[in-house]
Amino acid sequence: MTKQFKFVKKSLIIILIMLFLISAPVFASADAYKYDEMPIHLISQWVIANESVKISFEKTGGLDRDAAIESVWTEMKKDPSVWANVKHSNFSFKDRGNGIYDMIVTTEFHHNKVALESIETFAKDWASKNINPKMTDFEKVKVIYKFIGDNYKYSHSNQVFINGYSKYSPLSLIQNGEGVCNAFGGLFIALANQVGIDSIYIVSDVDAKGFTHGWNLVKIHGNWYHIDPTWAVEDGEAGMMFFLKGDSFVKQHRSWSYGDYPLATSDYFN
């Protein structure tokens, strides 16, 4: 094989590679999340009260913008602290082509990042004083539940803000000693997460009077259980009515979008 032939062959290979690269489809860039991951990443920015966020994601088959926004609200409802803090949001979308979209979100919050960080600071301080690392997960949950019930009350105020804090935020419990179910659920999550226990928030369906209620799911030894920290303020047996219960019991009293949350297959038996 002559040197000239080798040169021509090598040149043809290079040209073919270049043509392939030019005509090849553009795949998702490294900064583009999967569509199902998009809500979680936005909420992670709302947790720290980031007012301006851009998230890129993949979505084949076109984008339903209303459905994308609804997926964010669904995810947000799992964290009552975030839910209580979002005052207003504006969503816009940019189609970058090849199934890649930019979502730009500007948000106004009730409380700023410093205020939200004070919730975590409170939780850390509380855990260091009240939780023994040798405790079981059940014991930790019981201590958190009792602490909330002994120290806070349900707010019946007609005002959304009490001394500058939204009654829907854990900040209202910490600063004012009172709040509504969102506040109780959010504080429970903050304390539970601080001691290594997973918890999420459930929102009920609208009842006959047009109201909703929120409570928590908590994970103990790999299993999920219902727990309602708002009811911790009640006296006697009523205060333990929704303490580590399974779906079957809770369904007798409340309804919710069952498919949106983990299953709680039984009551907890210690």
Image (cartoon, rainbow, N blue to C red):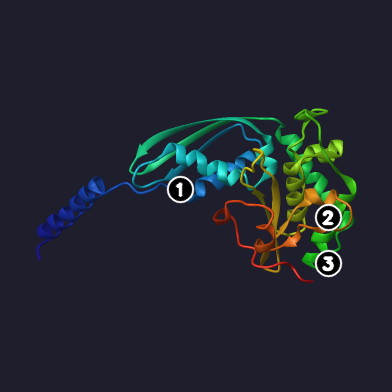
Name which residue lies at 89% across and 46% down: 151
Residue situated furthest bottom in the rendering = 270
Image location of residue 157, percent across then percent down: 81, 31
* Residue 48 visible in the displayed image: no
Earlier in the chain: of badge 3 and badge 2, it is 3
Callout 2 amino acid? Ala
Residue 24 vs residue 262, the one in the foreground: 262
Earlier in the chain: of badge 1 and badge 2, it is 1
Image location of residue 64, percent across then percent down: 41, 40
Callout 3 amino acid? Met
Residue 82 vs residue 95, the one in the foreground: 82
Would you name the residue on which mark 2 appears? Answer: 238
Image location of residue 207, percent across then percent down: 64, 43
Residue 10 sits in quarter:
bottom left
**Label 2 secondary element:** helix
Classify 10 Å Cα crowding around label 3: few (below 14), some (14-19), many (20 and above). Answer: few
Callout 1 amino acid? Tyr
Name which residue lies at 83% across and 52% down: 232
| Marks 3, 2: nearer the viewer | 2
Classify 10 Å Cα crowding around label 1: few (below 14), some (14-19), many (20 and above). Answer: some
In the figure, is residue 25 to the left or right of 214? left
Q: Is there a contact, CB below 8 Å, between mark 1 and mark 2? A: no
* Image quarter of the N terminus: bottom left
Would you name the residue on which mark 3 appears? Answer: 135
| Marks 1, 2: nearer the viewer | 2
Would you name the residue on which mark 1 appears? Answer: 35
